[in-house]
Amino acid sequence: MTRLTGSALRVTVFIGENDTWHHKPLYSEIVHRAHTAGLAGASVFRGVEGFGASSLIHTSRLLSMSEDLPVAVVIVDTEERVRAFLPQLDELVAEGLVILDDCEVIRYVGRGDEPGAPAAKGRRRS
């Protein structure tokens, strides 16, 4: 079970949903690498409208032709672990924005980690 409380670092990666890495979605590659690196967690959020360095507005509105909506990948862990992961983001993100924020984790409990909760599939409780 991963425990994370107190001071942490959040990295947010803003990319387009059509960005790819070796023919698969870039956001998926980032999440899988974060998982392999043992980071506490990663989530992908799809935006409904936005623009970046290209100044082109991407939107999900019905009459729009845009399909390359903005995506944010958010990862939170200790500063040491997040900073150790940054070289992988340098390799993966050719176009986009990567930001770091100090944050404080108040509660981080996985499913089945609370007392009295059933154990998650594939994991034993001790």
Image: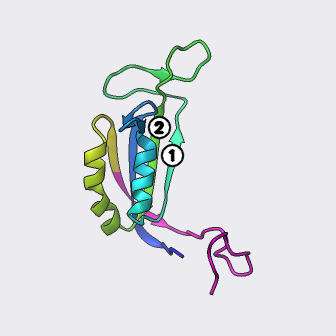
Is residue 19 shown in magenta?
no
Q: Which residues are magenta?
A: 100-126
The C terminus - image quarter: bottom right
Give the class, few, some or many, for how many residues have Cα within 10 Å of label 1's Cα (few <14, many ≥20).
some
* Upstream in sequence: badge 1 or badge 2: 1
Residue bearing the label numbered 1: 44
Residue drawn at x 41%, y 61% is 36
Closest to the observer: 22 or 80? 22
**Residue 123 position in % (x across, y down):** 62, 75
Residue depicted at 38% across the width and 63% down the height: 37
The amino acid type of the residue labelled 2 equals: Val
Alpha carbons under labels 1 and 2: distance apart: 7 Å
User: Which quarter of the figure has residue 119?
Assistant: bottom right
Residue 52 versus residue 61 in the image, above or below: below
Determine which of the numbered discs, if any, sits on residue 57 in the image. none
Q: What kind of element bears circle 1?
A: strand
What secondary structure is marked by label 2? strand
Residue under numbered circle 2: 71
Q: Position of residue 16 (x, y in %)?
A: 42, 32
69, above or below 117, in the image: above
* Position above or below: 126 against 2: below
Q: Are marks 1 and 2 in contact (CB under 8 Å)?
A: yes
The quadrant where residue 60 appears: top right
Q: Quadrant of the N terminus?
A: bottom right
